Image: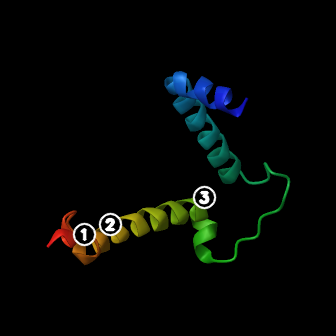
Amino acid sequence: MIVQFIDFFRDRMKMTVRLCYGVLALLVIIDIIPGLTGKEHHAHSWVEHYIPGWWSIFGFVACTLIIFVSKWFGHLGIMTREDYYDD
């Protein structure tokens, strides 16, 4: 049953991408509009007062930075050629 579910979305990739963008937009709107979740939000730092969705932006930038630094570090010396052990 789960395989059919995955195949359904794989066969309709354009719809799947649009659905994911819609869910992402909805989550950003919920995060930006104060009071929409029904919980009072208290900022812990000055950045949260002035930049809506600060922690979402921070998480995205941090994740992107981790990926690029890891790739750079990997190409710097961790990755070796495929015939390394054939010598």
**Vertical placement of residue 14 versus 20, above or below:** above
**Which residue is at the front of the view, 59 or 87?**
87
Q: Residue at x 47, y 68 (%)?
A: 62
**Picture coordinates of residue 13 (x, y %)?**
51, 26
Q: In what element is the residue under mark 2? A: helix
Which residue appears farthest toward the left when viewing the image? 87
In this view of the protein, which residue sits in the foreground, 67 or 4?
Answer: 4
Judge the density around disc 2: few (<14), some (14-19), many (≥20) Cα neighbours within 10 Å: few
Tag 2 residue? 71
Q: Which amino acid type corresponds to the residue marked 2 in the rendered image?
A: Lys
Mark number displayed over residue 53: 3
Q: Quadrant of residue 74?
A: bottom left
* The N terminus: image quadrant: top right
Q: What is the three-letter code of the residue carrying label 1? A: His
Residue 86's x, y, as percent?
Answer: 18, 69
Q: Earlier in the sequence, mark 2 or mark 3?
A: 3
Give the mark nearest the N terminus, 1 or 3: 3
What is the spatial separation of the Cα atoms under label 2 and label 1, in whole angstroms? Answer: 6 Å
Give the Cα distance between marks 2 and 3: 28 Å
User: Looking at the image, is 61 positioned above or below residue 2?
Assistant: below
Marks 1 and 3, Cα distance to the nearest angstrom? 34 Å
Q: Which residue is mark 1?
A: 75
